[in-house]
Amino acid sequence: NAGVTQTPKFQVLKTGQSMTLQCAQDMNHEYMSWYRQDPGMGLRLIHYSVGAGITDQGEVPNGYNVSRSTTEDFPLRLLSAAPSQTSVYFCASWTANTGELFFGEGSRLTVL
Amino acid sequence: DAKTTQPNSMESNEEEPVHLPCNHSTISGTDYIHWYRQLPSQGPEYVIHGLTSNVNNRMASLAIAEDRKSSTLILHRATLRDAAVYYCILRDDGSSGGSNYKLTFGKGTLLTVNP
């Protein structure tokens, strides 16, 4: 199993540009989340989804959009990138059966 | 949401046991205690979880206080590969209508293992 796959691994954007971070899981997990991690900080929840077609906001949702059209995919969209969004982004998925989160390897985003 | 408190950092010597504490004094009866660790430049990985009883797996042991207000992750013989940030988080099982999908991580404990 590939688990949770994130693309791209690295991205540099200019302020105001838009982009989408992709996240895909092949474990048929109902739950998926996006976190961001800033230097020396823990992970902060951006958005999460409890199933296809259902998403909700986490702790730091401003500046980000998500959608969940399929169980497998949970893309994170930055509509107008700002330097404050420079961070490492992690996608995670899990199932209620075990509650164990599986994380992707992360996407390092730099906004100039 | 119930919060957890962990020391910012701890240090251990290789091949010695390590006890990583976590306080969760506002834990509810439906909260599971989860531990994750994050190796440098990687995403977090699951270590262990439990509800009331002590738990063992191939990676570690989890000791849960009788009142469940604290827990301890035990690495029986630390290796250099165990150097990581360890996160203790609470996950509601959802049976009482709680949010079992809003999992929040604090800053964790940075474990340094000396050779």
Image: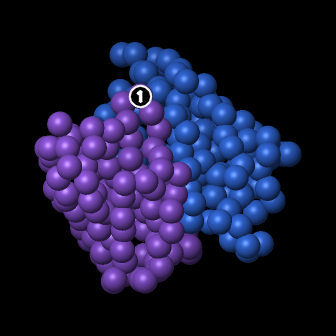
Chain colours: A purple, B blue
**In front of the other: A14 or A56:** A14
- Left or right of B58? Residue B54 is right
Q: Please report the residue visible at 53 percent of the width from the left and 21 percent of the height from the top.
A: B10
Name the amino acid, label 1.
Gly
**Extreme-right residue of the structure:** B67
- Residue A87 visible in the snapshot: no
Q: Please report the residue visible at 33 percent of the width from the left and 83 percent of the height from the top.
A: A70
Asked if B35 appears above or below B16 in the picture, the reply is: below
Sort mark 1 into few (<14), some (14-19) or many (20+) by Cα contacts within 10 Å.
few
**In front of the other: B64 or B25:** B25
> Residue B26 in the image: x percent, y percent?
79, 46
Q: Please report the residue visible at 43 percent of the width from the left and 76 percent of the height from the top.
A: A29
**In front of the other: B93 or B14:** B93
The residue tagged 1 is: A40
- Left or right of A82? Residue B87 is right
> Residue A110 in the image: x percent, y percent?
20, 40
